[in-house]
Amino acid sequence: MFDEDDLAAIRESRDDWESETLDPVLDEHGERKDRFATVSNLEVDRLYTPEDVADLDYEEDLGFPGEPPYTRGVYPTMYRGRPWTMRQFAGFGTAESTNERFHYLIDEGQTGLSTAFDMPTLMGLDSDDPMSDGEVGQEGVAVDTLRDMEILFDGIDVAEVSTSFTINPSTPVVYAMYVALADQRGVPREELRGTLQNDMLKEFIAQKEWVVPPEPSLKLVTDVIEYSVAETPQFKPVSISGYHIREAGSTAVQELAFTLADGFAYVEDCLDRGMDVDEFAPALSFFFNSHNAIFEEVAKFRAARRIYATVMEEWYDAERPESRQLKFHTQTAGQSLTAQQPLNNVVRTTIQALAGVLGGTQSLHTNSYDEALALPSEDAVRVALRTQQIIAEESGAADIVDPLGGSFAVESLTEEVESEAMAYIEEIREMGDGSVRDGVLAGIESGYFQREIQDSAYEYQERVEKEEEIVVGVNKYEMEDDTSPDILQVEKDVQERQLDRLADVKAERDDDAVEAALDDLRESVEAGGNVIPEVVAAVKTYATMGEIMGVFEDAHGAYRETVGMA
């Protein structure tokens, strides 16, 4: 963007500045430390100038918002048209308790629902399974049958609200319940809006929740995508998630690279199914973490859009603009929250949320300040939501499209993140002999991803312990006084009440209809076709989560991670 004469003049001026202005100050006062780096340990320079972006081509590398390569945003007006969706994560106890929290959030101005499930539901278990004892409703809402879904959305118009479901191994069942609920209420399926996480590759890489092995898990993900594109076209059938990769200890570059690799793996699996890339690609969505290093995070989001647009066109022949636009949800970094001095987390969350907005997110969840201690209280949730509303309404950050675009520092960091992420993606592709999907599966089985993340997590913790990385209130500015706030307590009788409801449903339902539906599902699994129609039919008979997921486990076997660490 600068000609060689301009760059030469800037170079000469910088040399003068360093010798005449900078060096005397460094000689007398020095700097705070010898090395400055991001949370991901990406070294940052003291000063950035046009020299650092000398190779940048405005039209090809940046362009304009709403046009390829979408570095500056997927929409031409971005938040000047409408703000991002404010989607606070909520779920605890029984369906009644979570329904009450949903109504509270809607009344407080939330514009989208986001559902958290308890561990048994996440793992495809019923509340009365021995493995569920003590976990029912503890870290999310318990959902065993369609009856729970009916209560969860009581008084909520599913045709009007956009709902996100943070669910992975048991996605087919939860999705089928939501479709069945719409059918029950006479809501056309094409009116349903929302997002399923449904990202099983990420589970094997980082979060570690699964029922069946990687390949049949991948097949179920693609089943949901194929069915949703046809039946619920406004619903996002997968949210390819870097969030949990980052929470497990990855760097920002690893988060971006591994997430995009997972996304390209799903693209390839859909293509092998015979689907048209321009039919399903617009339905794909992404989910990223936003951490404390604000400029690194903004660079990560901008690089993500540029890589995705380029790869979707060059590798997969995507033609529609919507097929090349990376759209994503952002959640602030849970891993960054501290139990010590928890009110400090309000500041951390604000910085992280601002990074998501400056980076062009489509929806945003802000963590509550007490989440390092317990599920969030109503007060903490309200502050988290108000944080988003203040950024949207008061800060001015929503008034300018890509406000950091053109910053020498941000553009340089964007290029650096892009280059390093693409190097990872190419390495994964080589592991699969030209297939990203096969490379991801091979990387899971060999422990490649796990080792990369483990090494990064260890290095970060080492820097914290050496006080090279400051965590306010933890390794610096500590306080001896107890600063813990009042925290949410899940009702003690939640498991008993959930078990009673499940027993009532089992007593009232038509057992013959349930068994017939499960038999149909078994036949569909054995035939290798898309199983989602049979799952929808099964949930309508009030077959349970565990009964349906048990069919898949019987067919494919359980999975245990056996990789060794190098």
Image (cartoon, rainbow, N blue to C red):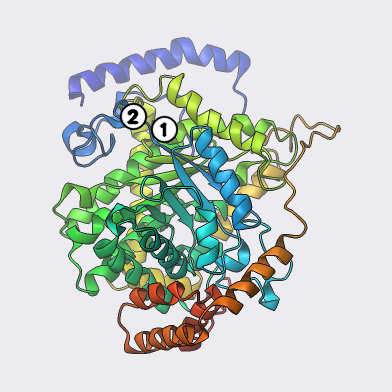
In this view, the residue in front, 98 or 503, is 503
Figure check: 509 above or below 310 = below
Point out residue 100 in the picture as x, y percentages from the top left corner.
59, 46
Res. 442 image quadrant: bottom left
Amino acid at dot 1: Val
Residue 34 visible, this orientation: no
Numbered tag placed on residue 79 in the rendering:
2
Numbered tag placed on residue 219 in the rendering: none
Q: CA distance from mark 2 to mark 1?
A: 9 Å
Q: Is residue 319 left or right of residue 282?
A: left
Instruction: Check disc 2 and give the amino acid type.
Output: Tyr
The residue that appears at 38% across and 41% down in the rendered structure is 301
Q: Quadrant of residue 80?
A: top left
Relative vertical location of residue 205 with respect to residue 362 in this rendering, above or below: below
Rendered view: 257 above or below 385: below
Helix, strand or loop at label 2? It is helix
The answer to the question of whether label 2 and label 1 lie on touching residues, with beta carbons closer than 8 A, is yes
Query: Mark 1 sits on what residue?
Result: 357
